[in-house]
Image: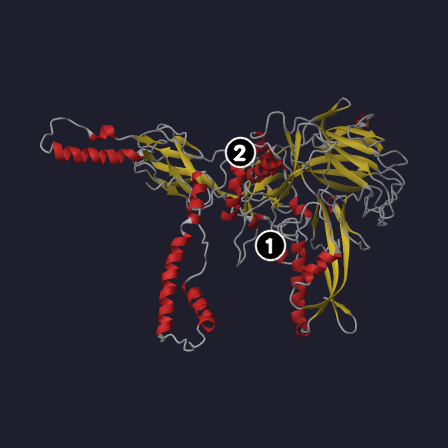
Amino acid sequence: MDFDFLPQLPSSHLDERNFDDLVEECLLRIPRYCPEWTDHNISDPGITLVELFAWLTDQMLMQFNQIPRKNYVAFLELLGIRLQPPTPAQVRLTFYLSTHLLENYTIPQGTEVATERTETQEAIVFTTNQDLLLGQPTLKHILSTPDTANTPQSLQDRTGQWHPQHDGLAVTHEFELFPQKPQSGNSFYLIIEPDTPLEGTVLEIAFTGAQGTPTGIDPKHPPRSWEAWDGESWVKVLLQEADDTTNGFSFNENTGDDDSFEQNGDVILHLPERWPVSSFDGYRGRWIRCTLTESSDRQPGYANSPRIKTIAIRTIGGSVQASQCVLVQEEILGISDGQPGQSFDVETAPILERQGEEELLVFPLGRLPEIWQEVEDFADSKPQDRHYVVDALTGTIQFGPLIREPQTLKKQTQTRAYLQQMLPADRSLGYDLHEQIIEQQYGAIPPHGAEIVFTYRTGGGKQGNVQANTLTFMQTAIPYIDCVTNHHAAVNGADAESLERAVLRAPQMLRSHDRAVTASDFEALTLKGSGGAIARALCLPMSASQTAGSVSVCVVPQANTDLIDLGRGIAPDNFNLNSALRDQVLDYLDERRLLGIQVQLQQPNYVGVSVQAEVTLEPAYKNPSAQAEIIHKLKVALYRYLNPLTGGPEMTGWPFGRPLYPSDIMALLQQKAGIQYLGAILLFPIQKNGESWQRQTTPVNYIDPGSLGLLCSWADPQARTEHSVNVLTDQSAMRI
């Protein structure tokens, strides 16, 4: 019997030579073994014999290629190993309202947003994962404290100085946000009414500045920080300085405007998706704070406290998580013929992991529709169980097979032959041959004439890792929406699993038995539980600061490596582990860990590298266009070598904790065609400072990322993180 319900994995050849390759190889051997044979024309009888034996060898290789690899693939099929489908990229979409709404508003789950469609590339569609509820906030308290602490204490309630006005508060006298002599750490808190749903909301806080002395700060670089409490820590919620038109509460005091005694300004805050109601020092609500930061030459501190007359808040939009996929609702797969083992194919493959209301319905004639359940295999399925199996990569839906015992047919044939010989004319015995047939139905069969309907999602792949501010086209019409965008790049999209990767996964599966016990088990199951969204995992050794019974796994998510070929590299922000992927992996490991073990996921310490190299090219590459091309190839090689996914000596990702030396760069560049000599090789480390990356101004002898560090390289003209290759001429160095 053909076991069609098992996943069909593609096979590859052990010997890739074909007929033409064999003929060419024989002709190359003639001068060595038979030098007197000089006529190699196709009309020569000897060439005919060569082609004959090449044909026979080609036929043998064809049979040879079908045996060992095919047996190994069949073994994978019996283990139930399927090629994993593509993983959809994740991104946070931000919707902005076109008007001020007086009531709560919902942007429904399944809203589609896409990139721009061009002549050469189809639009990439993202779908929201959940409803986005936009509530209308109410300011409840205004508090202040002289010191910044993770848990606010010694709060001074300033609410009594205010009275309600429209959608905010107004003060009867000028209100000082900070003490008269502001110091680093001074903070004021805005407490929002707890009963309003505001997770992921984009808030606009409108301030009216009062007459007063100048604050003394640089309006372009105000020394303050806006944060919100997400239940565990204070997270920054001011996306960019352009979202603060108050210029750090200095308004336009430096413009010399005569009407600057009373000025208006807004602060737009993008609040976290997890913004719970919390209580500190007896005050309950959703917390926002503004804290004065350390002053510097670039950011002078406040000489005087800003004075405010009114504060008003309102919702202008919201953010929600989205996946790169398209929801196909109630696709009709076909009509059941009532036979065991039947299969149906969806129109658009691959099929992403089912969630929510994505299900298969069977509509029997004259009866109510039935919801069928997906299973990994039919091993435990009873004849009455409404089960089906999905091959997500090919998009095939398979129903239960009918299995006959191997000896049944043989016994039936022997019995039939005996009856025909011994009792050819006696048909009165009533001997029923079917009583001896042993059959087993695994899973129920859809009734004859029943309609099969399937709801699923399709999509995924590395192409979903789109850049920031590219998802701007609404595919679903939603009222009151002015515009939509993604302020950050999409991450964690991965292509379908290859056969080679599945082959490597088989020994891990047999070794771990789908249970996380050893360090290698946690690493293998972390990769499996992510569905391909995590490229690398390292189970960390037990440290002195780590509590007993806890396991830490350092992970590197997938990213779009096509940016390397474009000469742009991959920035560390593209390797961020989002909350959705973190929860997915932790839930998967939670079902397979030992009792009492706590699993933690963490990210490596990424360190940026900028290389400045001097090269001399071969004389053949003196042409400017040839020089530009080879310089581009050198930069691409540097971006690929200094990368967590494709870098390192083995080109499988930069090893954890491996330092970088100038000799490594020399060895890399010496392998490239067109390089005659190498000059100076300078390494510049790039460290993260707050929300931005800064390149060190002086070169170093080597760069050590630390025991859990990984090296990255990317092109950012503002931070000067790109690689620089100088072509040395006879007279001077020319930068290209």
Which residue extends farthest top? Answer: 282
**Residue 562 badge:** 1
Q: Amino acid at mark 2?
A: Asp
> In the image, residue 50 lies at what x, y percent?
38, 68
The C terminus - image quarter = bottom right
Asked which secondary structure carries label 1, the reply is: helix
The x, y position of residue 6, in whole percent, is 40, 40
Q: Residue at 37%, 72% (x, y): give it.
A: 46
The answer to whether residue 581 is left or right of residue 204 is: left
In the image, residue 365 sits, relative to residue 14, either above or below, namely above
Q: Quadrant of residue 271?
A: top right
Position above or below: 720 against 243 = below
| In this rendering, position of residue 457 left or right of residue 332 | right
Q: CA distance from mark 1 to mark 2?
A: 33 Å
Please indicate, yes or no, whether residue 10 appears anywhere in the rendered image. no
As helix, strand or loop, the secondary structure at mark 2 comes to loop
Quadrant housing residue 237: top right
> What mark, if any, has residue 523 been given in the picture?
none
| Tag 1: amino acid | Asp
Q: Which residue is mark 2?
A: 514
The earlier-in-sequence mark between 1 and 2 is 2
